[in-house]
Image (spheres, helix red, strand yellow):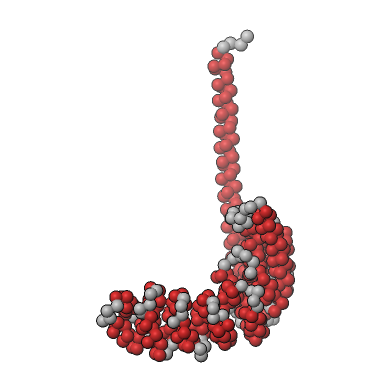
């Protein structure tokens, strides 16, 4: 029979040795982790330093090649050098001339960069990495990649629709959870659609419109961004007339939601698509019952100009919708001095925003407007006095 002291003396000693063993084990693991972190940091910094060095070399080489076509560019030896060359090409393409873009496209194709990125996209299972690859491909603006973008849109749209139907059958909101698979599909579709819009042609124009009509897909600002890209793509190919033909079809199509048409009209102003001014002015007659279209048209015409702008501003200052009156008053200072009496009348409008914009427009009209505001300081209408005083202080 064991001594009773064995349970009170020997057993704690064994536990003490075990505890010491695990303390040393955790200590050594911590040292190993620290060493690994330091080594990993050194590797990352070295790689980053090499990447920046290669970018400088490629930037110098590519820019020299643009002016001296006989200058040879050293082919990238590995993935890191390929990424450095891609970054340089994307940076140089921003704001480059049509001729230089064609030269960069030739360089990119010569070194097999499109195939390199497409292979990485197909082999990668992480959607965030796929998203970044599509973005890089989109910046390169290679026409032959339009088919790939359409393929991605079709594939991800099919998966998104299946997920939506499944969720609706179970009674859940299909976009209620930020972490759900729908997020992946939506982001990949939106990025592929952006890339496709930079290359948009007659064959892909209506596919883009179809995707933008998807319920709960992105936002109006996103739509405007896409339409600006489309306008830029047609301009780059000197096909403005073709775009105007497609736009007329878009506006005449009763199956296209009014908000999509509105976003396109607003994009014409943002992109300074001056060739569209006649079409935009006609929209004010075609969509006279839509406040959204009235607002979009008057904003766009204020940016690109048209002979009918002053006539439309006069009409919209008397519109029944306060939002239309507000937007009309905001840019009324562009008109001739004949608009001053109408703006003066707007200082007594029942909407605060109409009064504010009318007063500011009068202040921007020069002497004619400021004279009216000075007279309003003596008015018995308190609203008129307040707005006149505020606008005069802004001058």
Q: Can residue 43 be seen in this view?
A: no
Q: Can residue 345 be seen in this view?
A: yes
Please give the name of the residue rendered at 62% of the width and 79% of the height, measured from the top-left corner: 251
Q: In which quarter of the image is the C terminus?
A: bottom left
Front-most of residues 177 and 249? 249
Q: Which residue is drawn at 29% across and 78% down?
A: 381
- Residue 18, image x, y percentages: 59, 27
Say which of 142 and 294 sits in front.
294
Quadrant (top left, top right, bottom left, bottom right) of the N terminus? top right
- In the figure, 334 relative to 350: above or below? below
Q: In which image quadrant can residue 155 be found?
A: bottom right
Residue 176 sits in which quadrant?
Answer: bottom right
- Residue 346 x/y as whole percent: 38, 80
Residue 172: x percent and y percent? Answer: 62, 53
Q: Is residue 204 left or right of residue 368?
A: right
Q: Residue at x 56, y 33 (%)?
A: 23
Question: Which of the 4 image quarters holds residue 240?
Answer: bottom right
Residue 141, position as x, y percentages in the image = 66, 74
Q: Residue at x 69, y 72 (%)?
A: 207
On screen, residue 28 above or below 161: above
In-image side of 320 versus 44 (left or right):
left
């Amino acid at each position: 029979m064991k001594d009773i002291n064995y349970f009170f003396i020997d057993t704690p000693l064994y536990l003490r040795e075990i505890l010491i063993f695990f303390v040393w084990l955790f200590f050594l693991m911590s040292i190993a982790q620290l060493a690994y972190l330091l080594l990993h940091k050194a590797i990352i910094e070295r790689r980053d330093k090499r990447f920046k060095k290669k970018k400088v070399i490629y930037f110098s080489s590519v820019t020299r090649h643009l002016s001296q076509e006989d200058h040879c560019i050293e082919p990238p030896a590995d993935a890191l050098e390929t990424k450095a060359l891609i970054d340089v090409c994307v940076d140089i393409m921003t704001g480059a001339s049509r001729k230089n873009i064609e030269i960069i496209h030739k360089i990119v194709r010569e070194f097999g960069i499109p195939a390199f990125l497409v292979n990485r996209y197909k082999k990668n299972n992480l959607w965030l990495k796929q998203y970044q690859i599509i973005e890089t491909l989109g910046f390169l603006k290679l026409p032959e990649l339009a088919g790939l973008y359409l393929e991605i849109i079709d594939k991800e749209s099919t998966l998104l629709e299946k997920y939506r139907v499944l969720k609706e059958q179970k009674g859940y909101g299909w976009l209620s959870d930020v972490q759900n698979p729908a997020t992946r599909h939506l982001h990949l579709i939106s990025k592929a659609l952006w890339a496709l819009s930079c290359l948009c042609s007659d064959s892909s124009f209506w596919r883009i419109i179809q995707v933008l009509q998807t319920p709960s897909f992105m936002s109006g600002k996103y739509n405007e961004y896409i339409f600006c890209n489309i306008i830029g793509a047609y301009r780059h190919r000197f096909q403005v007339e073709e775009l105007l033909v497609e736009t007329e079809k878009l506006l005449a199509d009763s199956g296209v939601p009014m908000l999509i048409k509105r976003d396109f009209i607003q994009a014409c102003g943002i992109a300074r698509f001056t060739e569209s001014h006649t079409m935009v002015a006609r929209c004010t007659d075609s969509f006279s019952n839509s406040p959204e279209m009235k607002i979009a048209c008057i904003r766009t015409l204020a940016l690109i100009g048209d002979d009918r702008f002053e006539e439309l501003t006069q009409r919209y200052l008397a519109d029944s919708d306060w939002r239309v009156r507000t937007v009309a008053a905001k840019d009324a200072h562009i008109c001739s001095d004949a608009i001053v009496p109408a703006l003066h009348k707007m200082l007594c409008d029942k909407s605060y925003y109409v009064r504010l914009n009318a007063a500011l427009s009068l202040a921007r009209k020069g002497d004619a407007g400021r004279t009216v505001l000075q007279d309003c300081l003596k008015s018995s209408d308190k609203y008129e006095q307040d707005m006149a005083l505020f606008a005069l202080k802004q001058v």
